[in-house]
Image (cartoon, grey):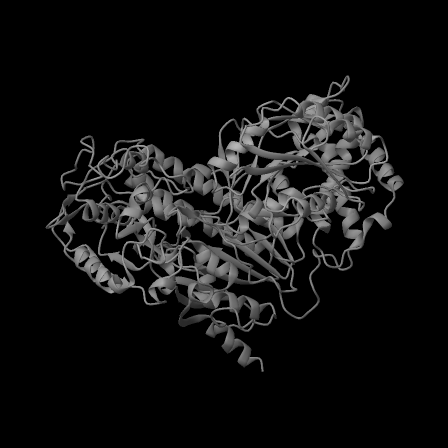
Amino acid sequence: MKQGLSVVVCTRNRSASLARLLTSMQSLDVPAHLDWELVVVDNGSTDDTRKVLRRARKLLPLRVVREREPGLSHARNAALETTARRHTIWLDDDATVQPEWLSVYERAFRYWPEFAFFGGPIAARFEGEPPAWIETARTLMPEAFSNLEPTDEFVEMGAESPFFPFGANMAFRAEALETIRFDTELSRQPGPILRGGDEIQVMKRIVREGGTGLWLPPARIEHWIDPGRQTARHIYDHAFGDGFLDEMYGHEDRVGPDETVSHEAIDRSFHCREQECADLSSDPAVWLPRLKAAAIEDGRELAWSLIPGHHRRRRTGSHRPLLALGLDGLALSVAEQLMAEGALPNLRALHEQSARHRLDHGDALLTGLAWEHFSIGRSPEDYGRHSAVDLDLQSYRVQQRGTRYPTFLNDVRAHTVVADVPYFDLAGTRAASGFTSWGAHDPGTIRESRPATLGAEIANRFGGYPGTKWIYGFVWPDERAAAEMAEKLEASVDLRTRITRWLLTERLPEWDLALVTAGELHSAIEALWHGIDPTHPLHGVASSGAAGRGVRAVYEATDRMVGELREARPDADLLLFSMHGMGANRSDVATMLLLPELLFRDAFGESAFTPSPDWTPDEHGRPMLAPGQDWSVAVNDRLRIPASVLPPEAAGRPVSNLDFMPAARYQPAWHLMDAFALPSFYDGRIRINLAGRERHGRVPVERYEGCRQRLVDLLMNCRDALTGEPVVDEIHLNDRAAPLDIDPTDYDVSVRWTHPALGLVHPDLGTIGPAPHRRTGGHGGPGVAWIAAEGVVPGDHGEASSFDVVPTILQMIGERVPESISGRPLPAIGRAAEATR
């Protein structure tokens, strides 16, 4: 069956550019099997575009669509109505293509069905004799010319992608756009304000719904910039439009600007700004960024003038603003020890002044989705997601997915400022500003800011996140690495404090609710726990001293953050919380390596993993890594599926963002097994290959309970290979749903471990491992909620659920708590409300 592709070009009154593009397309190398067409949408052209198209019909498989409503998104949507069930590739009418361009996309659609969209490089080319400063402009602000050349590597584009394709060179799988259309508010259209970004919003929506894209370096095009866009005015107009849309987009009270703003008004603003910048400097590296910044500010000012009660203004009401400060992974035991030593004066003062609850996250702790639970205000049972890892029941592929769910603030009128909250869908939240995925531990959502230029403002004013390399650091074998990680995480907390203070007091000072998180405590505990826990097996290694000092430094920096934010906004109530605590890691090696190897041996009677002879054991027989070695690389290098199970070409690495985890390397054999271990970060999770549920299910439903019991027996017969002790603490059999209805994020059997076992011994299957330790810290222990607010009585108010944090926030800002929200307001808040009646 031939594959159907539609190449779409939208055009309006640019016949010369269009003719150049169509000429370049006549040289395309078209695969013999390809069913393709060229769809040109004429968006109301009044020049000789029709004559150009008539000539092209004789040379290309051309189909013309006419759309009278002006605007690029209108034209794009018109094309989608005529290309249903066909993949689409999109070009601008001022581009040119190379002969291989079409075949690159055709192969991408054919070979990578898991990707929903694609995109390729765009190289700006300037017609005529461009001004001397144009190359500086292309370097400093390539987006003004749609110049996009971020990397020569094939890169997956998902929730954490730093870039997305531009509309001049992008492609979508047919099903990805089946129910999605381009936003006509954003697109290029007649009028004084230069708009854009409708295609980026489409891709971000696809990603939020679980899709991903792939960057295709060979799919390169050239984008021709006419002399009219080689001007300072074009730079100004582009940035002005960005600033305007940043503030205006999606606001329900907006006024149509094209009826109220004239070209002449923007002309006056431009000439004023141009003169200011020229007076300051003749160096384009100086005046261009200043002109861009001024234009963005002018665009914002226009938006503010057109929106009654602009969203930066607090609503009227008697409730004080609320600062909800989430300290991700706060280990209460560490904080209490340091407070007792006098090391955390701000946290100690807050502790004494607050109504305090210990929070229990229950079994939801093991989903790894604590911040999604917070951001959407729902428990796993209430929204049906039990892990960040999704299993495709047809292909057996696994992916770690970000959030796809609306936030608990979706229908809240109070204006919120968000600072790096993980799993928070900022784009889909109406009355919120701020940024996400800056330096969060497991951000769980796409990088986003509102206004859209806020991210660039932060980067220009403060620089980038210092600790990117160490968010998921692995350092116990290397003393120098442990010291560097500690230094960078401490610097990250201090920079986070500066940015948050600026955001809440200068940039967006009028708010009802500020949601602020800091993830450095989480990162520090996972990698550096052995430095503060004298009972940890690695407490005596060389990195232990640096690790212990690092944990202390990160806690002290966090204490400074608490003090500075309280000082900066003394008018605000404060809720400090952590959904769960942290402690020693008991699961990594057993869950990520030993369990999948156990099930593989049970299925095939052969080994896929063999320990490395280079892992020198310590005096207790624990294998050790050398400084600089990475656990995932070291372990995965020792894992090979035997050719007797699968031929080498079938046992290659799966395309997955979980490839770092050994459990994912067994994926090619899962369809041949009765049960297999899902990649997991905490408890071991086993999926039964059930007939009628998984595509190649091997276990009939009538054998399901017997299979689960056999897995229990298999696990209970395992002992620690180094100590001979039992390794299984608890085994859970999933009874949340009937076997055929257990969802793709859930397990059939889960196992929790007694201690951090490095190897297993089974009486029939032999010894598995040992392998070196991975993370030294992990999730565990209580979360906390400390409330310092008017009318709240300080002191210990007992234990509550972690799901009570969101209802508490809503009650504190005077909002109704919807029935869909899990939990209820914390008792301390309830008692305060009763006392005021």
Residue 315 placement (x, y as % from top left): 70, 64
Q: Dividing the picture into quarters, in which one does residue 543 lie?
A: top left
Q: Is residue 667 left or right of residue 71?
A: left
Q: Residue furthest right?
A: 264
Q: Is residue 250 left or right of residue 768?
A: right
Residue 673 placement (x, y as % from top left): 26, 49
Q: Camera-side residue: 518 or 111?
A: 111
Q: Quadrant of the C terminus?
A: bottom right
What residue is at 24 percent from the left and 44 percent from the top?
539
Q: Is residue 657 visible?
A: yes
| Above or below: residue 357 compared with residue 605 | below
Residue 204 placement (x, y as % from top left): 58, 46
Q: Camera-side residue: 832 or 426?
A: 426
Q: Camera-side residue: 371 or 633?
A: 633
Q: Is residue 585 visible?
A: no
| Above or below: residue 649 compared with residue 454 | above
Q: Camera-side residue: 301 or 20?
A: 20
| Above or below: residue 215 compared with residue 741 | above
What residue is at 63 percent from the left and 26 percent from the top?
221
